[in-house]
Amino acid sequence: MRALPKIAAAIGVLFLILILNPFATIPAGYRGVLTTFGKPSDQVYSEGLHFVWPVAQHMHRVSVAIQKGEGDGDAASKDLQTVHTKIAINYHIRPDAAVSVYRDLGNEPGERIIIPSVQEAVKAVTARFTAEELISKRSQVRDEIVLALKERMARHGLVVDEFSIVNFNFSKTFNEAIEAKTTADQLKMKAERDLQRIEVEAKQKVSRARAEAEALALQRQQVTPELLRLREVENQAKAIEKWDGRLPTTTGGVIPFLQISNKAAETNR
């Protein structure tokens, strides 16, 4: 019977602990900011279990994991073209800056710092480039925006992890002008390639003609009277080899390659 009051007291204490919940848990990817009657302390609490005074104190979680943000907005280029830019950014809160982010930004860095900083940086950098340069120098534009963002966000304990320009979009008139210029450049390149091909083919024809002329000239130099007589003898020899010993039955004309003297004819008589 004496043990019953003790058991009841223990149960009461346990119930009181469960109701008052004097412990706070900080999960991975977060840091804790402890407030006492609403006033944040300067200490940053890491992951794990921490004791807090019920009612008087409360542990607030501040995410220090990488967070993603997307946004778009309009700006003006150097040549006064309207540019609609869509961007994507990955960022995180420095763990040691968790207290200042909670106290100064209300634990809402995306709404209070990220979006305004991105819009300001995009507008400032876009104004330094023409609309055509924004396309041709996209990587340089991105790097300058990231540099401007880092300077603004670092003052509030925020770190830029990744930044990308998803898309640049211009007015319909400018897009048509860019398309027409691209088509003209492609036609110009095709015409230049055709001209180069024609020039090469012409040079090839000249080279072949020169080679043929040189070959003919060489052949003429090699043709001598002795060579002509030799070719004549060779042709006569071939004709004799093909002759079957019979004279043509038709009269008129000259019997080719046969020379019979009158003396030999008289002897045959």
Image (cartoon, grey):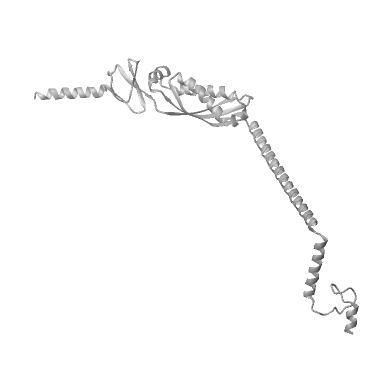
The correct choice, above or below, for 251 with respect to 194 in the image is below
Question: On the image, which quarter does residue 184 sit in?
Answer: top right
Q: Residue 181 at what x, y percent from top left?
A: 67, 35
Left or right of 216? Residue 68 is: left
Q: Residue 204 at what x, y percent from top left?
A: 72, 48
Q: How many marks?
A: 0
Q: Residue at x 73, y 44 (%)?
A: 199
Q: Residue furthest bottom?
A: 269
Q: Residue 180 at what x, y percent from top left?
A: 67, 36
Q: Residue 35 at what x, y percent from top left?
A: 33, 17
Quadrant (top left, top right, bottom left, bottom right) of the C terminus: bottom right
Quadrant (top left, top right, bottom left, bottom right) of the N terminus: top left
- Seen from the viewer's position, the closer of residues 209 and 82 is 209
- Seen from the viewer's position, the closer of residues 153 and 228 is 228
- Seen from the viewer's position, the closer of residues 180 and 20 is 180
Left or right of 78? Residue 238 is: right
Question: On the image, which quarter does residue 123 sit in?
Answer: top right
Left or right of 137? Residue 23 is: left
Q: Residue at x 19, y 23 (%)?
A: 12
Q: Residue at x 65, y 34 (%)?
A: 176
